[in-house]
Amino acid sequence: MGEGLQPVPLKVAERIWAWDFIDMADLLPEQWAVKRDEPLVAQLMPARKRRQVNDINVWVQCFLAYVSVMSRRFPLEVAELLAYMSHIHRASLEFMGTAWVQYDTVFRRQAAASGCRRWPVNYQCLALFHVFHGKGGGR
């Protein structure tokens, strides 16, 4: 893991390397924070209370951890993943509401289910998704 990035447990990293769907909440820093007063086994268990990742800054932090893990096994895909992140970030700035979260979840679930390992993002598709599923118009 890169310096300054939250370490991702091997169990989660293996799911990422298998191109499984990963809920961004699984990559929240507090999910795996080490608590010094707990036994080691308890330290490695995910936090019980989950929060939704629907803030773009939190999503970017989680996605950077995802990309960092992917870069260890799939370095050639990193540029594509970063382009995907850029499109999601752009959508969060241009469109009101949380359609970008819904799009991201649907896109990554479908990619995992289909075994898709290339994530080319058509920004027009993302914009259309917003129109049909989003709340309100552009900012």
Image: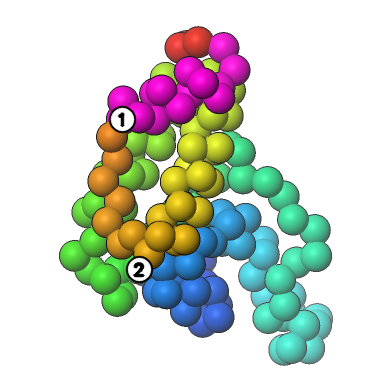
CA–CA distance in space, label 2 to label 1: 23 Å
Considering only vertical position in the picture, is 57 above or below 33?
above
Q: Is residue 64 visible from the viewing direction of this image?
A: no
Color scheme of the displayed model? rainbow
Mark 2 in CB contact with mark 1 (< 8 angstroms): no
| Residue at the extreme front | 114
Q: Is residue 134 magenta?
A: yes
Of the residues tagged 2 and 1, which is closer to the observer? 1
Q: Is residue 131 magenta?
A: yes
Residue 73, labelled with which disc? none
The residue under the point 78% across, 88% down is 39
Left or right position of 47 against 98? right
Where residue 111 appears, as percent x and y from the top left, is: 41, 55
Considering only vertical position in the picture, is 119 above or below 122?
below
Considering only vertical position in the picture, is 19 above or below 96?
below
Which quadrant of the structure image shows residue 1? bottom left
Left or right position of 74 against 31? left
Residue 70, labelled with which disc? 2
Where residue 115 appears, as percent x and y from the top left, is: 38, 64
Q: Which residues are magenta?
A: 123-136
| Residue at the extreme bottom | 40
Q: How many marks?
A: 2
Q: Amino acid at mark 1?
A: Tyr
Where residue 75 appears, as percent x and y from the top left, is: 23, 68
Q: What residue would you read off at disc 1? A: 123
The residue under the point 34% across, 60% down is 116
Q: Secondary structure at mark 2?
A: helix
Which quadrant of the structure image shows residue 77? bottom left
Where residue 85 appears, as percent x and y from the top left, is: 36, 44
